Amino acid sequence: MSATNPNLMNTIEDPKGHVSVKLQPNRYAKDSSKKYFGRTVRKTHSVGNILQLVAKKVPQYDTGTVYSVCNALEQTIIESLKKGNSVNCLNLGVLYLACKGTTDGTTETPDISVKFLQSKLTKDAISEIAVEKEDYSEPVGTITKIVDVETASAEGTLSLNGTVQITGKKLMIGGEGSGIWLAPATGEEAVIDESGADWTPVTAKLSVNKPGTLLFPLPKMLTSGTYRIVLKTKTPLYHKQVRKELVKTVSDAVVVQ
C-alpha cells in the first residue's frame, strides 16, 4: 500500500447535489428588458421514501415503530396549527399562519393560509446545489388534439363550415391582439407565411374558451386546403396579470374539405 495514501476512504468525495432548471421569459416585466425566471424541475421523495431512509438511520428500531413516531409527529403538528400556533419543524424551519389577500376590515375577515419560513440549517443544506441543466422554455400553449365535431374525427381532417374542438394546455384566448387564425400551409413541411398576410381569422364567438379546451366554428369564407391553426393570447395561466406580449401556438397541419 502506498505510504502517501494509507487510507483510501480519504479519496472519496462528497459530490454536490444538482437540480435542473427551465427558464421562461418574464411576460409581466414593466420594462422591455430581456429577463427570465427559472423553474426547478421538481423531484419529490414520497412519505414512504422518507420513512425508509429514516428507518435506515435508526436500525435499532423496526420500520413500524418509525412509522408510528412519524405519524404521531404529523398529528401533533396539525393539532398545533389548528390551535393557531406556529410550529418549529425539527429546526428545518417554521410553519406559521399568515393572512391571505385583502379585506375591508368591517364585514369580512382575512383568509388564513400556512407559510413556511426556512431556517439557516435548511438554507445551508442547499447552498452548494449546482444547476446541472438549464433549458429555455417559451410559455406557449400545447395542442394535444384537434377534433372535427361533425364527424368526431381527430385524424387531421376538418369539415368545411364545420366546428372544431381543440384540447391541450394554456390555450385560453384573451387580451389585445389575441385570436385564432387558419394559416394556409404549403409544401411537404406545411410552411406558413409568418407575416399573417393570408391568414383567415375566426371571427365568431368561441363556444368554449378555457385553458384546456377551445370550441369554435370555422370561418365561412374558408376554402378547402391544408392549414395550420394559429393561436395568439395574452391570457396567463396562473396569474391575474395579463401578459405583456402575445404568446403564439401553431398546430400541426390539418386538411379542410
Image (tube, grey):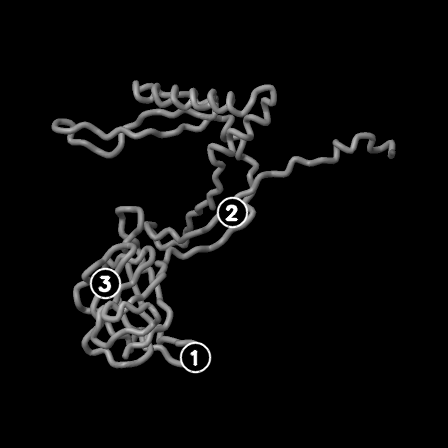
Work out whether residue 257 can be spotted: yes
Question: Residue 33 placed where, x, y %?
Answer: 39, 53
| Left or right: 125 in relation to 94 | right
* Closer mark to the observer between disc 3 and disc 2: 3
| Kind of residue indicated by mark 1 | Glu
Query: In the rendered image, which quarter is residue 62 located in?
Result: top right
Foreground pick, 100 / 34: 100
Secondary element at image label 3: strand
Question: Do the CB atoms of the residues marked 2 and 1 lie less than 8 Å apart?
Answer: no
Q: Residues within 10 Å of mark 1 (few under 14, many from 20)?
A: few
Which labelled disc corresponds to residue 20? 2
| Kind of residue indicated by mark 2 | Ser
Q: Quadrant of the N terminus?
A: top right
Residue occupied by mark 1: 188
| Left or right: 148 in relation to 20 | left
Q: Residue at x 29, y 77 (%)?
A: 256
Residue occupied by mark 3: 215
Question: Do the CB atoms of the residues marked 3 and 2 lie less than 8 Å apart?
Answer: no
Foreground pick, 37 / 223: 223
